[in-house]
Amino acid sequence: MHREVCKVSLAKKIKDARRDHGRDDVAVANARFDAAEALRNQGRYGDAQRCYLEALRIYLEAYGEGSGGVFNTTVTLGDMYSEMGMYDEAHTMIKRSLRIAYTFKGERSLEAGKCINALGLLTFRQHKYVEALAKLQEAHSILEETVGPDIHLVGANIETQGNCYRMMGQFEEARAAYEKSLGIHRTAFGDQSEEIAVSLGCLGNAFSDLHMWSEARNKFEEALEMFRRVHGEKHPNVAFIFNNIGSLFLKEGRLDEAIKMLKKALKIKRRVLGEDNADVASGIMNIGSIFASQGKHDEALEKYDEALIIFTRTLGKDSDKCAEAHHNIAASKFFSGDEAGALENSKEAVRIFRMRGMTDQNAQTAADFLKLVRG
């Protein structure tokens, strides 16, 4: 398994393809694309981007703009840019893939549905939940029409709709969407799969939002058992469930148990993903939030500073994650008596949120806090 994703092994496959087929052969593009997928899964976005772009160049020269290789690479690269917070670049790539779909496959094609779904996910990541939900529902109509109601792609779309409802505070609607998605994944994959475990984790979050603690814990434990069976103990998805359980403990006021669970999640992420990964930074920031809840603002500040460094290195200084980190740093400084430092970080948080056009709860909280700091 390690060999399949090892950078050395991936480079060898590309070298072998060049030797056997020539430098600009489609086989090289395929090897490049596979390498990009593996590197992306490891959070090594810079290396992944270079591989995607090289694959795209070869596909374009070999087959032209309307080829499947160009379509798959542009929509996938667009989704990775979206994941990285490079929203303008993501929009450009996904729109390019949508033009290809409309031109060569039609407006109600599976390819068009995939692109519109990617635009919905991009908009969700920009915290524009109403707009994202509309895009996802449009995509759902096309996907269900082209591939049927019981396909993973449809289930994943409904799951993301659930995420929109959850972020909008519509927890019952989120619960209904997650339950529907879970049913589709059970039909598509049987009773034991990673997709089902993810749906169970999402459903657990909905129960947690509704203060249905025992139901939430049951779903998390079911998901955890399934992830362990599929992946073993040391996997990011196992960390995902540990993190959710930690958040549940936090809501219940069980702070010591919450921090213990979040530390377990972070340990797995660090071991599997390495230090330079945005998920690792998120895990560090979550632990900082527990310290802040306990009034340990110096310890919280240390964690927030560490997270900010990683977010800046991996996502860029103007990412929404950096804005969240600046806001948390500002709060810790303020409650520690450093009002000048709090003002500086608070201004930076608001600047980033405004620059990105974000008006969600995080952005509003940062703006309100800046007013408080200014007195």
Image (cartoon, rainbow, N blue to C red):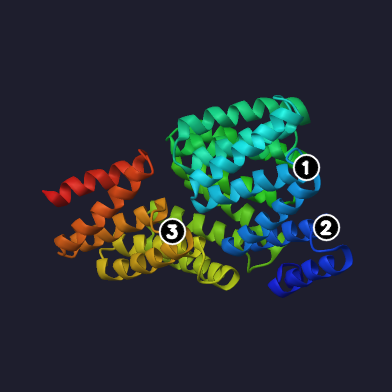
Question: Element type at marker 3?
Answer: loop
Q: Of callouts 1 and 2, which one flags the residue occurring earlier in the amino acid sequence?
A: 2
Apparent side of residue 176 relative to residue 109 in the rendered image (left or right) = left
Apparent side of residue 303 relative to residue 335 in the rendered image (left or right) = right
Badge 3 is on which residue?
316
Q: Position of residue 130 (x, y in %)?
A: 46, 30
Tag shown at residue 68: 1
Could you tell me which residue is drawn at 19 percent across and 63 percent down? Answer: 341
For residue 225, above or below residue 301: above
User: In the image, what residue type sits under mark 2?
Assistant: Asp
Which is more toward the observer, 231 or 362? 362
Tag shown at residue 37: none
User: In the image, what residue type sits under mark 1?
Assistant: Gly
Q: Position of residue 140 (x, y in %)?
A: 65, 29
Q: Of callouts 2 and 3, which one flags the residue occurring earlier in the amino acid sequence?
A: 2
Name the residue furthest front: 61
Name the residue furthest left: 375
Give how far apart the Cα atoms at labels 3 and 1 are: 31 Å
Asked if the residue under mark 1 is in contact with the one under mark 3, i.e. CB atoms within 8 Å, the reply is no
Give how far apart the Cα atoms at labels 2 and 3 are: 34 Å
Badge 2 is on which residue?
25
Could you tell me which residue is drawn at 45 percent across and 65 percent down? Answer: 313
Question: Element type at marker 2?
Answer: loop
Which is more toward the observer, 48 or 204? 48
Residue 305 image-quadrant placement: bottom left
For residue 345, above or below residue 123: below
User: In the image, what residue type sits under mark 3?
Assistant: Gly
Sort mark 2 into few (<14), some (14-19) or many (20+) by Cα contacts within 10 Å: some
Which is more toward the observer, 159 or 307? 307
- Quarter of the image with the N terminus in it: bottom right
